[in-house]
């Protein structure tokens, strides 16, 4: 049985679930993937896996609510692989008992220990860096996250909402490095440096630097590739021409990253195929496809970074376990509200 990939709709998923549930136990060369990734990003990998192995991947694309979906299905869930963006979501899947531990040298030998679960419940597949965009005429080639709060940047910084998950994750990692008191002081200093209210999206940071509203800004790395490639249209391509991307680091640390990751579902009817799929996704071949599809950084050090991103230098991911930052996300959200970051 091969199921056409499609966006989530209630009717379609209900039909799909019934079909998949009814075939549990007989799917020898198939697996069922639940993912929140955009179809255009993941489909090239699925096609390559099927071509390489002969295993069919039945895909359900969920915009959100992956945990709620699997909980509702219970032990009859046909899900084999749960793939999503954000380490916090993966940790949440584990805490809700929706994943299972697996052992795979192919995975643990490629993925750094800081980017996978200690018990083998989930594994990072790609990384996106929380980067700094800088005006091309600015004499700036390096900066730390701590320096974003320096008074020299007063009225010169653009960033999106402090409550957005991208920035909550950054603040959470800052807390993991320096503690809550220091993080609150940093966040207050960063707010004082804003050129405009914290709002909009990451690509708006490039737009506003191009428009001389700010000199530097905080945004994700892969947007640079999307803008420079022309995938976002000619206007965004022009925005990208006005910026240079810098990979900041924490003092005595590395660059803050978030991940796309995946786990084998707790009740996976096709566990062996699910593990095989995850192992394929960290292969040199699949990692190169991933990097080219969305300009993300591979977790496999042997894989090729897309040239549009690679020219900004090598990424050195942060030295702390990504889960350490996840632990402080609730505190980070509360802190953003306490300092009135978005006001």
Image (tube, rainbow, N blue to C red):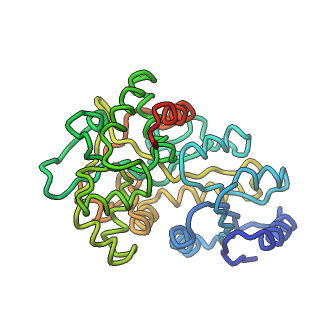
Q: Is residue 265 left or right of residue 111?
A: right
Residue 341 picture location, percent across and down: 44, 39
**Is 150 on the left-hand or right-hand side of 98?**
left
Q: Is residue 225 left or right of residue 201?
A: left
Q: Quadrant of residue 244?
A: bottom left
Q: Position of residue 91 (x, y in %)?
A: 61, 40
- Between 297 and 47, the one lying in front of the other is 297
Residue 58 screen position, x and y as percent: 69, 70
Q: Residue at x 86, y 68 (%)?
A: 18
Q: Quadrant of the N terminus?
A: bottom right
Foreground of the two, 39 or 201? 201
- Please determine whether, in this image, residue 108 is positioned above or below residue 329: below
Please tell me which residue is depicted at 70% across the width and 64% down the height of the picture.
32
Residue nearest the observer in this picture, 276 or 312 = 312
Residue depicted at 54% across the width and 49% down the height: 86
Whole-percent x and y of residue 285? 43, 65
Query: What residue do we see at 37% from left, 38% from top?
Result: 191
Residue 100 vs 334, above or below: the answer is below
136 and 117: which is toward the camera: 136
């Amino acid at each position: 049985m091969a199921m056409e990939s499609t966006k989530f709709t209630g009717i379609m998923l209900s039909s799909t679930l019934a079909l998949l549930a009814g075939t549990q136990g007989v799917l020898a060369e198939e697996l069922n993937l639940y993912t929140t990734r955009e179809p255009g990003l993941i489909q090239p990998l699925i096609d390559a896996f099927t071509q390489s192995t002969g295993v069919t991947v039945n895909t359900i694309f969920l915009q959100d609510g992956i945990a709620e979906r699997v909980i509702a299905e219970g032990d009859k869930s046909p899900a084999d692989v749960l793939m999503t963006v954000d380490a916090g979501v993966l940790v949440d899947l584990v805490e809700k008992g929706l994943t299972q531990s697996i052992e795979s040298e192919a995975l643990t030998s490629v993925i750094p220990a800081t980017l996978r679960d200690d018990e083998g419940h989930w594994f990072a597949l790609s990384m996106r860096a929380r980067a700094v965009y800088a005006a091309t005429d600015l004499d700036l080639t390096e900066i730390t996250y701590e320096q974003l709060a320096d008074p020299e940047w007063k009225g010169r910084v653009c960033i999106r909402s402090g409550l957005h998950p991208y920035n909550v994750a950054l603040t959470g990692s800052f807390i993991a490095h320096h503690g809550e008191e220091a993080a609150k002081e940093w966040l207050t200093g960063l707010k004082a440096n804003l050129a405009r209210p914290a709002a909009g999206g990451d690509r708006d940071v490039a737009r506003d630097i191009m428009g001389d509203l700010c000199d530097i800004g905080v945004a994700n790395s892969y947007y640079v590739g999307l803008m420079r490639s022309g995938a976002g249209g000619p206007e965004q391509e022009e925005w990208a021409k006005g910026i240079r991307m810098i990979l900041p680091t924490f003092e005595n640390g590395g660059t803050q990253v978030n991940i796309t990751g995946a786990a084998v579902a707790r009740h996976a009817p096709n566990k062996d195929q699910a593990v095989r799929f995850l192992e394929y996704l960290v292969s040199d071949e699949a990692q190169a496809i991933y990097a080219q599809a969305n300009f993300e950084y591979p977790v496999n050090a042997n894989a090729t970074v897309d040239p549009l991103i690679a020219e900004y230098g090598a990424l050195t991911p942060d030295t702390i376990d990504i889960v350490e930052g996840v632990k402080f996300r609730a505190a980070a959200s509360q802190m953003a509200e306490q300092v009135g970051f978005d006001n």
